[in-house]
Amino acid sequence: MQKRSFFSFLFLLTSSAIWAQAVQTVYGSISDKVSEEPLIGANIYLVNSNPPIGATTDANGKFEMQVPLGRQSFTITYIGYKPQTVPEILVASGKQVVLDVKLEELVNKMQDVVVSAETRKDRANNEFSAVSARTFSLEEVTRYSGGRNDVGRLVTNFAGVNASNDSRNDIVVRGNSPTGVLWRLEGVPIPNPNHFATLGTTGGPVSALNTNLLKNSDFLTGAFAAEYGNANSGVFDVGFRSGNTSKHEFLVQLNMFSGVEAMAEGPMNKRKDASYLMSYRYSFAGIGAALGIPIGTAATPQYQDFSFKFDLPNSRKAGKFSVFGIGAYSYIKFIGKQLTTEDLFADPYSDQYAKSGLGIIGIKHSISVGKNGYIKTVLSGSMEASLFDQYSFPDSMNRQHITQVRDYTGTIRLASYYNRKFNSKLSLRAGLTEEVYILNSKRDTRDGFPDWVNLRNTKGAMSLTQPYAQLQYKPIGQITWNVGVHGQYLSYNNTWSIEPRTSLSYQPHPRHTISFAYGWHSQMQPLPVYFYKAQNSDGTFNYDNKQLDFTRSHHIVLAYDVKIADDWRIKLEPYIQFITGAPIEKVSSSYSVLNAGANFVFPDKGFLTNEGQGRNMGVEFTLEKFFSKGFYGLLTASVFDSKYKGSDGVWRNTTFNNRYLINFLAGKEFKVGKQKRHAITTDLKFSTSGGKWYTPIDVAASQLAHREVLQEDKAFSEQYPYYLRLDIKLGFRLNGKKGKVSHTFYLDAQNVTFQKNIFERRFNLQTGQVNNVYQLGFFPDFMYRIQF
């Protein structure tokens, strides 16, 4: 007790010292990783500080300290818990730093062992996720070259993850369709969080998820923990950070893709940790297009979004409440005569108008139940709207309305779980996620028909119910076993599943970890697939798609992780995934829904059945040097094979079977100025992969039909050339003398080699030939930010 009191006095004395150099406030909380109970009297101190700087947590597990500007590392200790080091935190002017750290309790407390401080940047926040999972931070989103302030594009730097193309952020995980991705915000599923989103998709051209509001979040690529359901390929488990509880702060930012942004945060009730955080963004792409910067289309996209989080006053009896939300709107019109045959999103033979809207609002509640238990509940509501109209020109004088889409989806979601820590060895989490969809979806066309034909007309409601339970057991400090079960029931057609999940991790040495995981996963079909009605030969309609079962998959993952030095790690992860129940046609064909989802629309396919299969297998390699001593590095490589089988019984490449993915990223930060307050930053990213597979065009048949006709018997038999891109980023960070204002600027030169990566091959109606359409060429992205 006397020793701890001495350190507390020393930390208090040195923390209150007046430094000759500029300082900034670092504050936050320290809690138990499993029970989330605050740790009273935990010590946090600045690494390699002279004189020493530190603080001790109060009765609520909170601390505050003054720290010099620059990159700083912190070590946190508490008796009976593993020490933890949080490395290379950027402490800058104009923005206070928040550190919320969760410590892991030691299992073998009575043994006379020395436990070194851990750096946990390679692990997920969710303690039940043992493999194929990692955390990403706000700083990583803005640090890496080529990221465009988009978390979707950020994760393409990780092993086994690829973007479908440069113009959209659809995420392809281990050869799976992007429709297999689940998005969660504050612990509850959310709709597609992108501008220009359409029904059933998970990606889009521009993200509506503001990265300036994000806290450290998880991304998972396989064998998920039992609490994650309705996903077959990947999970984004993101959260909004809380606003500053002691000081009002502001941000103004200008970025080519995310637009012009204004953000404000600050306290609402300092004594009870109540705060606000709000941000508004408006598109800047129109100005960039006017300057001649390529954005993939001659049309000018308009989009805007508003995001917020309010932490309400805390109460010991009532618990903690917060309110969060996103509102987004986007609009674009493609006028045919203004376009070329190389436009990435439309064609010059029609006029197209697209609108989309997104609204999400939720309330989150957390309350302690006993000493080592708590209940977290999130109730949210969302509204999606996607409207599309297309007009063709049958002759030079007239314009004909040929397509009309009106999709409206309202969803009410409830996610609640009980978490209990029995002791340092055993913990439990059990919960329920309930989603109720209120649908109004209609699609009409007369493209190829003499009069209007209704292809989709659905009104009504349906629900998806997902109960789950999972246990974590640590018989000794070196072994962690997770076991759980996930259930899923869809009221639309009474389909259900019971899915076992398990993982086992063993540490034969503090620097080495061997892990194994298995998961049985299932996912409902994209809504446009359920709702499509096919026309019979007698003019009536077939509704077989409504009865489609879940697409199901077995995930088997083995992982070996070794820390070759304090800031270096190597990870090797082989995996295999068996897919069953994929929708395919009843008649013999090569079609499978496993190849859809990387575009704005789904193929018009009816008479589907759950007889399709798929198989993804590969090995992933990661060599990572975490940011320290002014530089970082990341090398990821994946070798994989992605195959599917349609109703014709032939195993084929999926369109996403690139075969290999390689990413190399590196960056260096140079301190400049008299007190080394400022920094010049340089970042580099090199990416290459095998090309996507595609179905060749039947030129002769296309010329006769005056439209593109594919050689379906040769589906996905040809591969585009390899993809290659080099991005170089140069930035500057300026900190004010008094620690009140900071400026950040970067120029991100993407595809500096002017590589012509093929987007797709198209049949040109005017020339009667097949043309190559290329992805974005050289693209200069930039950002300026001021914080005060």
Image (cartoon, rainbow, N blue to C red):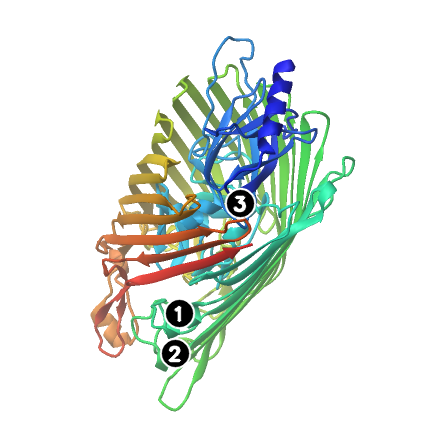
Where does the image place residue 386, in percent across and percent down from the top left? 53, 66
Q: Do residues under tags 1 and 3 come within 8 Å of each other at their CB atoms?
A: no
Mark 1 vs 3, N-terminal side: 3
Where does the image place residue 243, in percent across and percent down from the top left? 62, 48
Residue 63, visible in the rendered structure = yes
Residue 55, visible in the rendered structure = no
Name the residue located 51 percent from the left edge and 23 percent from the top edge. 83
Mark 2 vs 1, N-terminal side: 1
Q: Quadrant of residue 101?
A: top right
Q: Quadrant of residue 377?
A: top right
Residue under label 2: 350
Q: Do residues under tags 2 and 1 come within 8 Å of each other at their CB atoms?
A: no
Residue at mark 1 to residue at mark 3: CA–CA distance: 30 Å
Q: Quadrant of residue 245?
A: top right
Residue 288 is labelled as 1
Name the residue located 53 percent from the left edge and 18 percent from the top edge. 474
Residue at mark 3 to residue at mark 2: CA–CA distance: 39 Å
Residue at mark 2 to residue at mark 1: CA–CA distance: 25 Å
Frontmost residue, 390 versus 565: 565
Q: For the residue marked with disc 2, what is the amino acid?
A: Ser
> Considering only vertical position in the picture, is 487 above or below 604?
above
Quarter of the picture holding the N terminus: top right
